Image (cartoon, rainbow, N blue to C red):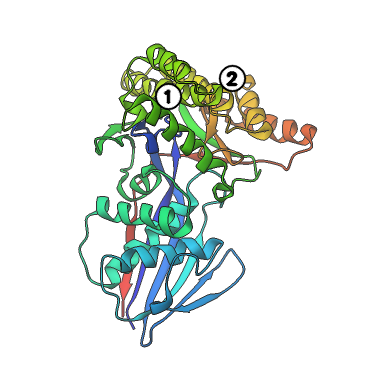
Amino acid sequence: MKTVIARAPGRVNVIGEHTDYTGGFVFPMAIELGVTAQLSKRTDQIVSMRSKQLPGDFEFNLSELTPGLVTGWAAYVAGAVWAVKQNLEISFGIDISIDADLPLGAGMSSSAAVECSVILALVTLLEKDVPMRELARWAKRAENEFVGVPTGSMDQVASLMSKADHLMLFDTRDDVIDLIPIDLTSADATFVVIDTRSKHELTDGSYAQRRDDCEEAAKILQVKYLRDITDLDNAIDSLISAGANNRIIQRLRHVVTENQRVLQAVAALKASNLQQLGELINQSHASLRDDFEVSCPELNLAVSIAIESGAFGARMMGGGFGGSTITLISNHLVETLKENAVVGFKQAGYLSPKVYLVTASEGAKIVSTHN
């Protein structure tokens, strides 16, 4: 029976966090770590799923595929199949095997990489030609409606549509993608991800609460997206007049200032001003920590260690509540950063962090197709 293997990368977001679902700007890139999905046709209507990294085999009839049918890692796989099924007829069962070198729950979008690899492989197995941007919408729908996490579209778009040696400026309100070249080699610098190995789980309601806060602010201010707010002081005054609590004001302030930082970061990168880019990254972390309240002690420690190690800038990355930080740092300081991170985390009584050097990589692709 026909088999298709697809690989989708994880992503890091240089700056622009918790802005994609508010119509804002984000600035991610795909990385070399990712997820590989192998899909093979079956002669029946059974879908079987297994992972080389995680325990448990799952099996169900394609006709029974509805949200809530499976949970855990398998929900992202089943959700991807479900999303394709909402758009294309699937007349056969599927054996699905997932393999990954991308760490799970580390804030590098392993969930989107799973969804995108499965969707790309399945559409290819169906011999259909669907634009990558549309596949990203399907993957987002899988996460939102099947898994139940109300994420924006950044992760799926970055995983499917990134280009090597480029960052992606993604205007989520106007759905405009601008690929910005990046050359850190000539600057003798690199991006480093520190996986704190602390819990990163977006299905517990904390992420959804932040989104609800943003939607409440937008409703009070009578705008579709917080991205539409251009006068922050006036907007804060309006929230205060409407009786909004301080939490809603903080969420608004983060989103509006973060959007400004993304555009400033693009300008800094184009001018090869890593010092300014680093400072914007630092400001982003402070805003996420204080106004959006999605950081945690492990993330704050990793950022502090990076700054003390001489980094241009560092911040928490991803949904928050654990996961990873991203650091912009000169190459000659990377080993110092690694050593300081291990020592600092040990002294704090935390698990030893994992450190990854990441580069801007190509988006999802078909690895092989054979009968």
| Residue annotated with mark 2 | 310
Q: Is residue 14 visible?
A: no
Residue situated in front as seen by the camera: 10 or 80 = 80
* Amino acid bearing label 2: Gly
Which quarter of the picture shows residue 335? top right
Q: Is residue 83 visible?
A: yes
Residue at image position (45%, 65%) is: 67
Above or below for 45 versus 171: below
- Residue 12: x, y in percent? 45, 39
| Position of residue 170 in the picture relative to residue 199 (left or right) | left
Quarter of the figure with the C terminus: bottom left
Of the two numbered discs 2 and 1 on the same chain, state the one appearing first in sequence: 1
Give the vertical position of 23 relative to 79 (above or below).
above
Q: Are marks 2 and 1 in contact (CB under 8 Å)?
A: no
Q: Position of residue 92 (x, y in %)?
A: 33, 81
Give the residue pinned by disc 1: 258
The spot of residue 291 in percent (x, y) is 54, 24
The residue sitting at 43% across, 69% down in the picture is 66
Image x and y of residue 5, in percent: 37, 67
Residue 132 horizontal side relative to residue 264, left or right: left
Between disc 2 and disc 1, the foreground one is 1
Give the total number of marks visible in the rendering: 2
Say which element carries label 1: helix
The amino acid on which the numbered mark 1 sits, given as a three-letter code, is Glu
As drawn, 11 above or below 257: below
**In the rendered view, does 140 fall on the left or right side of 178?**
right
Residue situated in front as seen by the camera: 205 or 4: 205
Image quarter of the N terminus: bottom left
From the viewer's perspective, tell me whether residue 357 is left or right of residue 158.
Answer: right
Q: Secondary structure at mark 2?
A: loop
User: What's the distance in space between the residues labelled 2 and 1, CA to CA?
Assistant: 24 Å
Q: Residues within 10 Å of mark 1 (few under 14, many from 20)?
A: many
